[in-house]
Image (cartoon, grey):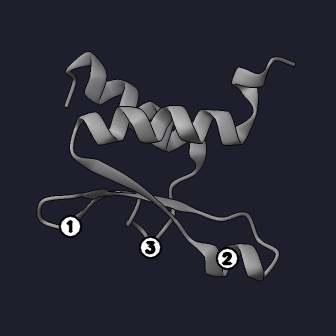
Amino acid sequence: MSRKEFDASRMRRMKRVAARRGLTILTSDKMKTLGLPGGHAVREDESHAIVFGDQPRPFSASLDEVEAYLDALEAGEE
């Protein structure tokens, strides 16, 4: 397994992509302390509005879903 495949490496890479678009990736620390996997959300820096990962509940997006969302933004699909 290469380093590129580790979740921490993926998160750093995604945060760089998000920052170029004026976005921030948020992670729910509360879920982690409960022993559940932490969920994610994407916030627009200018308005502080959550643009992805808040439906059906806050921090509902998985790491894979956030990556797919950012890939779609990079490809110009959204």
Q: Earlier in the sequence, mark 2 or mark 1?
A: 2
Q: Is residue 32 above or below residue 63?
A: below
Q: Is residue 76 above or below residue 20?
A: above
Q: Amino acid at mark 1?
A: Ala
Q: CA distance from mark 2 to mark 3?
A: 11 Å
Q: Earlier in the sequence, mark 2 or mark 3?
A: 2
Q: CA distance from mark 1 to mark 3?
A: 12 Å
Is 7 on the left or on the right of 24, as rendered? right
Q: Quarter of the image holding residue 45?
A: bottom left
Q: Which residue is label 1 attached to? A: 49
The number of discs equals 3
- In the rendered structure, find residue 31 and report the number of the disc placed on it: 2
Q: Is residue 5 above or below residue 41?
A: above
Residue in the image at 61% along x and 34% along y? 10
Q: Which residue is label 3 attached to? A: 58
Query: Percent position (x, y) of residue 76?
Result: 20, 20
Q: Quarter of the image holding residue 17?
A: top left
Of labels 2 and 3, the one closer to you: 2
Residue in the image at 56% along x and 71% along y? 28
Can you name the residue that lies furthest to the left here?
47
Of labels 1 and 3, the one closer to you: 1
- In the rendered structure, find residue 74 and report the number of the disc placed on it: none
Tell me if label 2 and label 3 are in contact, CB under 8 Å.
no
Which part of the image, by quadrant, shows the N terminus?
Answer: top right
Query: Percent position (x, y) of residue 31?
Result: 67, 76
Query: Percent position (x, y) of residue 40?
Result: 51, 59
Q: Amino acid at mark 2?
A: Met
Q: Earlier in the sequence, mark 1 or mark 3?
A: 1
Residue in the image at 57% along x and 41% along y? 11
